[in-house]
Structures are given as structure tokens and as C-alpha cells.
Image: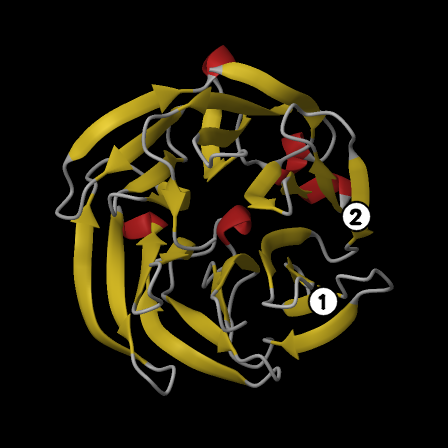
Amino acid sequence: MDVLLDGGTFFECPRWHGGRWWVSDFYSTTVRSFGADGGDQVEEVVVDGRPSGLGFTPDGDLLVVSMLDHRVLRRSAAGGPLVEVADLSAQVTGICNDMVVDASGVAWVGEFGFDFFAGAAFAPAVLSRVAADGTVTVAARDLAFPNGAVVTDDGSTLIVGETFASRYTAFTVAGDGTLTDRREWAALPGAFPDGCCLDARGRIWSADARSGRCLLVEEGGRVVDEVTVPGGLHAFACMLGGPERRTLLVCAAPDSDPAKRSVATEALLAIVDVDVPGAGLP
């Protein structure tokens, strides 16, 4: 892989939108965008509660998860300040994290479920659904850290990674927006599935937070390809983008320890071209 950009604190939740890459950088509290070649960098917004999950509404507004205060914020496509869309505090038990926004503007938001970084005992988490009007409901319970999710092109299926269960779990999205037909999509023993994306053959590129690998996984769990980020770093998220959506971008860092990452700028973004383009959302 080639290094596209370095000098971050902890890059997460990469997206390709409007001909540009977008990424959250946790401990600089910024969301940045930049061109396909890594140039023309723009600091888009500052999120004091630490930015994580990113997505875009059908109108092109930016949605961003504010991790520490459990909120989803929005900035108009025309610019302006961030405004609160939803407060998830009443239903989550850990910090909020990743998010996928579907074609109707519904945001699906994951959380840790417990204070992982303080060494608390494991507790199951919920996946929250934030409707376009800001209404918040619990979409699914008893998930082992829902982290990284995709929605298929037709909007009928949501697949979410359960990091602490080493698997992907799929749901059918019903007409009323509820999730039904919960099922195991793929088991990945020994892996920590983190940020992910879907390709045009229905496979998932999955960043393995336990290693520097990004795995290409078929439904059922067969790993058909993998890439490794440079420098012995760990892979924490990935996205297919670029003009033909054939560039795989991976967020990498030495570890996810807040005490270390908040005082260093060792995170980077690595890229490699792949044969099959991206599909679905994000």
C-alpha cells in the first residue's frame, strides 16, 4: 500500500463524497476532507465531543457522531454551524462510535456498550436508529460492540460488525424501518472487525483492528483477499472511493490507546487500487 496522508492522531470513518475523501481525526477533534491525491486539505468542522461516524443526507448535509456526548450533529451542505440532530444519551451505555447513513437519510449509530478504555467488564450494546426527523429508537440490542456497518444498494439489508464477537451480523430492513431476520453473515475467528465497506460483488472489506490487515470477506466468512498497511500499524477502518470507486483507503495507527494517540501524530491513511469497485453505503 502507498501512504496517502500521515500526521493524524487517530483517523476513523473514512468516506468518499463529492469527489473528495472525508475522515474524522479523533484527538484533533476535526473532520477533514481532501482530494483523491491527498491534496487540497480542508478542515470541515470541529467537534469538541470527538468526531467519529460520518455520513451524508440525500441533500448532501454532513452528519457526524459526537462520541463523548452521544449526539449526532449536522452541517448543511451550504455550510454554517453544526446543529444537533439527535441525543442518544438515554439509550446508550458506552461512547458512540461508527455510523452509516442510508439513502433515505436514516442514520444507524453504534456504541461500545461499556467503558472499554477504562477496563470495565464487557456489556452488550445497542444499535440506534436516527430517523431523518431526528427521532431516536433502538434498532437492535445485545450486540457485541456494533462497529462498522454497510447498507446494500437496494437498501434492503444492513450488515454490522460485532467487534468483540468476531463476526458480521445482517438484518433485513423492513418497510417501516425496523430491523428483522437477524442472522450471522460471516464469522471471522481471531479478528476484530472494525470499519468496513461493501464491494459490487456483495463482499465486505473489513479492517481488522487486531492487526494491520484489511480482509475481503464473502458472506459465510471466506476470506478471498487481504492487504496489509505499512509500518506494522493496525488497521481501524477502510473505504472504497476515488473517481471509479476502486481505491481502497485504510485508516491505520500504532494502537487505539487514547493516552498514546491523544499526544502523538502517528496515524496515517494508506491506499491501494482494487479490481472490484465499491457499492452500497457508506
Residue type for callout 2: Glu
- Residue 266 appears in the rendering: no
Q: What is the quadrant of residue 20 in the picture?
A: top right
Indicate the position of residue 271 as horizontal and vertical percent values. Answer: 50, 23
Q: Is residue 148 visible?
A: yes
Report helix, strand or loop for mark 1.
strand
Quarter of the view holding residue 151: bottom left
Q: Disc 1 versus disc 2: distance between alpha carbons?
A: 12 Å
Between discs 1 and 2, the one toward the N terminus: 2
Q: Would you name the residue on which mark 1 appears?
A: 74
What residue is shown at x 47% (from left), y 36% (from top)? 236
* Dot 2: element: strand
Closer to the camera, 68 or 127? 127
Front residue of this view, candidates 1 and 235: 1
Quickly name the residue at label 2: 44
Give 173 or 184, whichever is nearer the viewer: 173
Is residue 134 rendered to the left or right of residue 250? Answer: right
The crowd level at tag 1 (other Cα within 10 Å; few <14, some 14-19, many 20+) is many
Q: Estimate the x, y position of residue 99 in percent, counting from the top left.
A: 51, 59
Q: Residues within 10 Å of mark 2 (few under 14, many from 20)?
A: some
Give the farthest residue toward the front.
244
Does residue 44 appear left or right of residue 223 in this picture? right
Indicate the amino acid at tag 1.
Arg
Front residue (pair 175, 225): 175
* Rendering coords of residue 116 (x, y %): 49, 51
Q: Does residue 17 appear left or right of residue 115 in this picture?
A: right
- Residue at coordinates 80% horizontally, 38% vertically from top-left? 42
Q: Residue at x 56, y 42 (%)?
A: 14
